[in-house]
Amino acid sequence: MAKNRFSSGDGPSQRQLRVGELIRRTLSDVLIRAEVHDPDLNRISITVGEVRCSPDLKVATVYVAPLGGTLGGESGQAMLAALRRHSGELRHHVSKGLTTKSTPELRFRLDDTFDRLDETRRMFSDETVQRDIARRDDDDDDADALG
């Protein structure tokens, strides 16, 4: 298979990023306006964090999180079940905003970015890590004074 001469790495292409962002915005709008015909889904405030498209744009993985809920709890699982149940209707709404030949299949996953951020904050607030950071800053100041 030929390499794309404009690609600068193994990351997603500009087209994948553009289509993913368009899908994210469209899904966010549809969910905010409660255009899906399901009262259970419309009761949940959903954050669409990111959409990653496959290179052939046939599959879009949608990372979602319940606003104010926990991922591992019942609200996260109920939200995923409702989104998966209505993926066809959501895909239809997405197709109206896309100009691609076909609309990607939507696959929903829980977005754990916020949980990882909390864990990172907890690690940085640890006393040992704070001491190591302070020591490294002191070493950098000493090197600047000598150089």
Image: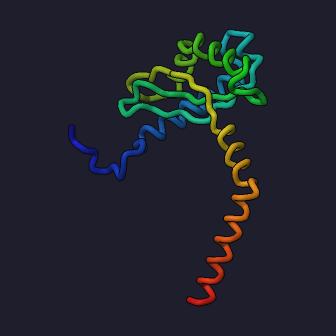
Q: Is residue 79 above or below residue 53?
A: above
Residue 67 placed where, x, y %? 75, 29
Residue 104 placed where, x, y %? 45, 23
Q: In terms of depth relative to the viewer, which is nearer, 139 or 85?
A: 139
Q: Residue at x 51, y 21 (%)?
A: 106
Q: Is residue 132 above or below residue 146?
A: above
Q: Residue at x 65, y 41 (%)?
A: 116
Q: Quadrant of the N terminus?
A: top left
Q: Is residue 58 left or right of residue 49?
A: left
Q: Is residue 136 above or below residue 46?
A: below
Q: Is residue 10 left or right of residue 22?
A: left
Q: Is residue 69 left or right of residue 110?
A: right
Quadrant of the rendered structure where residue 86 is?
top right
Q: Is residue 103 left or right of residue 8?
A: right
Residue 37 placed where, x, y %? 68, 10
Q: Quadrant of the C terminus?
A: bottom right
Q: How is the image coloured?
A: rainbow
Q: Is residue 42 above or below residue 13?
A: above
Q: Residue at x 72, y 58 (%)?
A: 128
Q: Residue at x 56, y 23 (%)?
A: 108
Q: In terms of depth relative to the viewer, which is nearer, 80 or 94?
A: 80
Residue 31 placed where, x, y %? 68, 23
Q: In terms of depth relative to the viewer, which is nearer, 59 or 135?
A: 135
Q: Residue furthest left?
A: 1
Quadrant of the rendered structure where residue 127 is?
bottom right
Q: How many marks?
A: 0
Q: Residue furthest front?
A: 128
